[in-house]
Amino acid sequence: MAVIDLANPTRFLTLVNRVLPWLIAATVVLFIVGLARAMNAPDDYQQGATVKIMFLHVPAAWLGMMGWGLMSIAALGTLVWRHPLADVAGKAVAPIGAAFTFVCLITGSLWGRPTWGTYWVWDARLTSVLVLFLLYLGVLALYWTAEDPGRGSRAAAVLALVGAVNLPIIKFSVDWWNTLHQPASILRLGGSAIDPSILTPLLIMTGAFTLLFFTLYLAAMRNEILRRRVRSMRMVQAQEARA
Amino acid sequence: MTLGPHADFIVAAYAVTAFVVAALIAWVVLDYSAQRRILGDLEERGVTRRSQRGNGR
């Protein structure tokens, strides 16, 4: 099957039904391994056991940003090629990305209180992630409240593209401004600053959360395709009733 | 495994994450069964999509 064939919703549904059980199994296995490694990881020499919050916070932050990146790519498909599957992809990823951004903010606050002495500070990293969350809520409002679904999708796609400007701001905020949030410690020149005993479970947990994200994403796309079929069948039903 | 003096914060972080993940899973599972049920009802009543009509349905 060529990649372009997947742009057909029916073929896409067939693929999703085939892939989902394997994705679910891989996600469960990776979470079991990741959580076991995370619980047995040593305490940080400065932060103590609170470093365990990192195994949730970092993957959630990554997925919140990746979700917006995927939504921006889908937005291009919606606005430039007007492909219905691109619109499905954009709409399905928004609630999942918003949920992981919410987890990032909450776990960050719960990590910040014992580490920094405060739940919240208006520094560039925290504020830009809060802006990301608010942008997600804006996109969801456009998708869920627009009277005309097509118009709502196009408006959401425009917001997704404009909001993509926030992604490099989040990433480089710790370099561009003086922040309470620590600078990059995983993806940085010179290699990770984290000891392998903590880095390994972090990478496994990140992999597990990423698999979970794509499992939920494919399932949500399948639901959205079915919802559109329901809508089109109801329209046919209404037209036939009127005729 | 000991969680030290800040155990409450660690447990709360894991609890919130578990709750959000469970809510996402419940959302996709319940939404899927709801859409399948509605589609089944419509098909039982003989309603078809326009694209299916060309296939003799």
Image (cartoon, coloured by chain):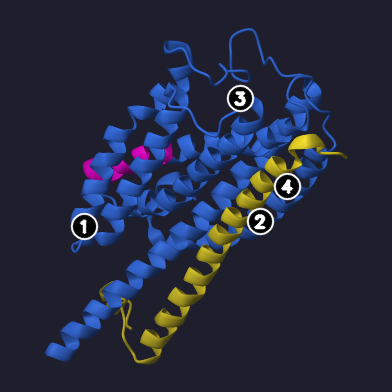
Chain colours: A blue, B yellow
- Marks 4 and 1: same chain? yes
Lower sequence index among marks 3 and 1:
3
Output the chain of dot 3. A
Output the chain of dot 1. A
- Check disc 3 and report the residue beneath it: A116
- Marks 4 and 2: same chain? yes
Amino acid type, mark 3:
Trp
> Could you tell me which secondary element the residue under label 4 belongs to?
helix
On the rendered image, what quadrant is the C terminus of chain A found in? bottom left
Q: Which mark is residue A102?
A: none
- Check disc 4 and report the residue beneath it: A31
- Check disc 2 and report the residue beneath it: A24
Amino acid type, mark 2:
Ile
Q: Could you tell me how far apart the alpha carbons at marks 4 and 2 are, in whole angstroms?
A: 11 Å
Residue density around tag 1, few if under 14, some if 14–19, many if 20 or more, within 10 Å: some
Question: Residue A200 location, x and y as percent?
Answer: 76, 29
Instruction: Give the magenta range.
Output: A68-81
Please say if A193 is above or below A229.
above
Q: Which mark is residue A150?
A: 1
> Which is in the foreground here, disc 3 or disc 1?
3
- Marks 4 and 3: same chain? yes
For residue A238, which quarter of the picture?
bottom left
- In the image, taking residue B30 as reference, residue A229 lies left or right, namely left
> Could you tell me which secondary element the residue under label 1 belongs to?
helix
For residue B22, which quarter of the picture?
bottom right
> Which is in the foreground here, disc 3 or disc 2?
3
